[in-house]
Image: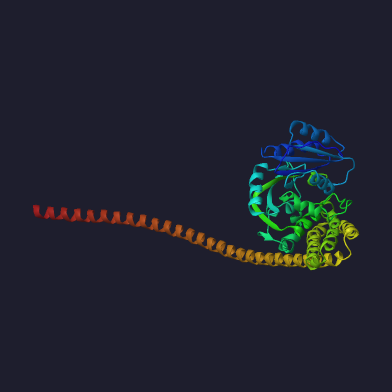
Amino acid sequence: MTSLPTPPDPQLAVVVPCHDVAPFLRQMAQSVLAQTMPLELILVDDASTDETLAIARALAAEDARVKVVSMAENLGAFTARRIGVAHATAPYVHFLDADDEGCAEVYPLALERLRQSHADVLHGTGDYVPEAGFQPSKAILDEFRQDKFGPHAPELLGQDIFRAPHAGRLWFGLLWNKIISRALLEKALAIFPEDFQRAKLGNDIPLVYALYFFARHFLPAPDLVLCRYHVGRGETQPGAAPWVESRFLGRFSCVPVFDLLAQVDASRQPDIAEARATFLANCAEAIAPRLADLPEAARAQMHQKVLAVAPADFPPILQRVTLAVLGKTRASLQRHRDGLAQTREKLAKNREALAKHREALAQTRTTLADSRKSLAQTRMTLARTQKSLQALRRSRRYRLACRLAALFHLFRR
C-alpha cells in the first residue's frame, strides 16, 4: 500500500472506499473539497481495474487535503474503510460511497453539535438523487424512501443506544448518514478479525452494530443532510443483480458480529440476543414480500439461496413472517373484495336510480308534449272564439243600423 501526506490538524476525515468508480470519483471529491474547513479526504482504492487510482492520485496532486491509499488486493468496502480509518488523523470520521456526494456545507455545523454535546455518533439524513432517465423498480422505491434516511430515535446515552428499537432496523445499518468519533471507530473496529466481512453488500451493518454497542452518546440530527445518495449508480444501476439477491443475501454475513460482541461483554448477552433476533426478523420482513412477488419457480430458487446463506435459526423466522405476510395479503384481498362488492352494490343502486330518473324524464317529456298539444288546441279555440266574437259584433251593428234606419223613416212621416 502507498499513501500521500495530508495537511496538519484536520477536523474531519472523509473516508471513501473506491473500486472501479472512475466516472463518479471526481464529482464526489469536489462535493467534499468545496468545504474550506480543515479536513482530509481519504480515498482507499480497493484494487480497481479502471482509472480510479489514477484519478485519485490526480486529485491528491491538485489538493493537499486528499490522501490516497492503494490496496493491492480487492478486499471489499469493510476492509477499505478499516484501512482508511487507520490512516485518519482527524477526531471525527464521515464515510461516503464513491458514487455519491457529500454535503460539505453542513460539516462545520455537525462538528459544532458533536463538540457541544460530547456525542460520539451524530445521525443525520440524506437526499435521494435519481439518475437522469433512471426508472427505479417498486422494490428500489420502497427501499429508498426519503423518510428512511434520517434518525428515528431520540437522543440516547450508554447502553440504551444498543437497546433502542431503532438499532434493529436495516436502514440504521447505514454509515454515510453519520459522523462518528474516530476513537469510537477504532474501538469498534478492534473487535473484528483481519479477514472479517468479504460480502460486497450489507457491509455497513456489522460496524454500525459495534458502534452502537460501544457508543456513549447518540445525537440525532434530522435537519442535517450529510449525503446525496445517487440511485441508479452502483448496486441500483440498470443491469445490476436482482434486488432481493443483491440487497439482502449479503446481510447474513453480518450475523457473526453478534458473537463478536458477546465475546467482548458476556453480561450484555440478553441485549445482544434481542438485537440479533430483531435483525433476523427485519431481514425476514424485507425478504418475505419480495419472495411473494416472484414467480413460483423463481421463488423456490431464491428461497434455497436464502437458506444456503442464512443462519440455522432463520428458516422458522422466515416461515413465521411469510405466514404473517400471507395473512396480511389475504386480509387485504378480502378487504378489496368487500370493497368491490360494496362498489358493485352502490353501482347497482345508482343504475336503479338512473333508470328511475330516466323514466321520470320520459314521463316529463310526455307531459310536456301533451301540454304543448293542449296549448296549441287552446290557441286554436281562442282564435275561433275571437273570430266568432268579431262576427257577432258585426251582426249587432247591422241590426242596430237597421233599427236606426226604420226609426229615421218613421220620424220623417
Color theme of the render: rainbow
Relative side of 109 to 393, left or right: right
Q: Quadrant of residue 376?
A: bottom left
| Front-lying residue, 251 or 115 | 115
Percent position of residue 300, x then y:
89, 59
Relative side of 317 to 125, left or right: right
Up-down relation of residue 23 to residue 143 (above or below): above
Residue 23 visible? The answer is yes
Relative side of 367 to 228, left or right: left
Residue shown at 53% from the left, 63% from the top:
360
Percent position of residue 67, x then y:
78, 38
Q: Quadrant of the N terminus?
A: top right
Percent position of residue 139, x then y:
76, 53
Residue 132 visible? The answer is no
| Front-lying residue, 290 or 25 | 25
Residue shown at 48% from the left, 59% from the top:
368
Relative side of 354 to 118, left or right: left
Up-down relation of residue 276 to residue 48 (above or below): below
| Front-lying residue, 24 or 153 | 153
Up-down relation of residue 254 to residue 352 (above or below): above
Up-down relation of residue 394 to residue 90 (above or below): below
Q: In this figure, what is the number of numbered marks?
A: 0
